[in-house]
Amino acid sequence: MLARILLTLTFLFSSTRAITDQVVSSSSSISIMNLESKLETYIVFLRKSEGMVSAKPEHLDNWYQSFLPAVTTSKLKKEEAKAMEKKEGFVSAWPQNVLNLKTTHTPNFLGLQQNLGFWNHSNYGKGVIVGVLDTGVTPNHPSFSDEGMPPPPPKWKGKCEFNRTLCNSKLIGARNFYSAGKPPN
C-alpha cells in the first residue's frame, strides 16, 4: 500500500517536472508570454477540512487537503477559476486588485473638501493624535512634510528623541524603545 502511494507521488512529481522542463526548454518565448498574459492572480477561499484524517490510501485526498490553508493565492486563467466553483470545499475566488497607496492627505483621498459642506463646520478629527509604532522612520521623506498642517495640540506631551529639528507639525514625536534592555524614559 505504501509502495503504491510512493509510486503515485513519484509519478506526479515526474510528470510535473517533465511538463515544466518542456515549457522552460521551449525555444518559443512567445508561447510562454501568451500563457503568462492569460494568467491572473486570484485570492482563493476554501472551506477548512474538518475532523481527523487517516493515512489509508482511500483517504489520501482528504489527508492532502488537511494541509491546505483556508486562504491562498493562485495564478489561473479565467476558465480555471470558473471551474474551481464546482469543486468541493471551494468558497470563492477573486482576482487580485493592486491598489496604490494614497494616504499622505487623508481628507483629499476621501474626497472631503475643507471649504465645502459640513466638513468645514465640523470638528471631526480636530485634536486627534494618531500613534504609529514603526521600526524606523525617515523624517525627511516627503510624506512627513508638515505643509498646511496645524501645530500639535497643546495636550501633546510627546518627545522627539532624535534631532529635534527633524520633528515638525506632522511628525510630532519619535521615541526609541530599544535601549539595550533598559526601559524608555
Image: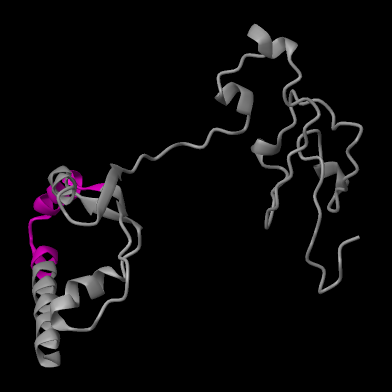
Q: Is residue 96 above or below residue 3?
A: above
Image quarter where the C terminus lies is bottom right
Residue 37: x and y in percent read: 19, 45
Residue 152 left/right relative to 63: right
Q: Report the predominant secondary structure element of the magenta stretch.
A: helix
Residue 126 left/right relative to 7: right
Residue 121: x and y in percent read: 74, 10
Residue 42: x and y in percent read: 28, 48
Q: How is the image coloured?
A: one colour
Q: Is residue 57 above or below residue 74?
A: below
Q: Which residues are magenta?
A: 21-40
Q: Is residue 153 above or below residue 133?
A: above
The answer to which of 92 and 138 lies nearer the viewer is 92
The answer to which of 34 and 7 lies nearer the viewer is 7
Residue 21 left/right relative to 94: left
- Residue 69 visible in the picture: yes
- Residue 116 visible in the picture: no
User: Which image quadrant is residue 168 in?
Assistant: top right
Image quarter where the N terminus lies is bottom left
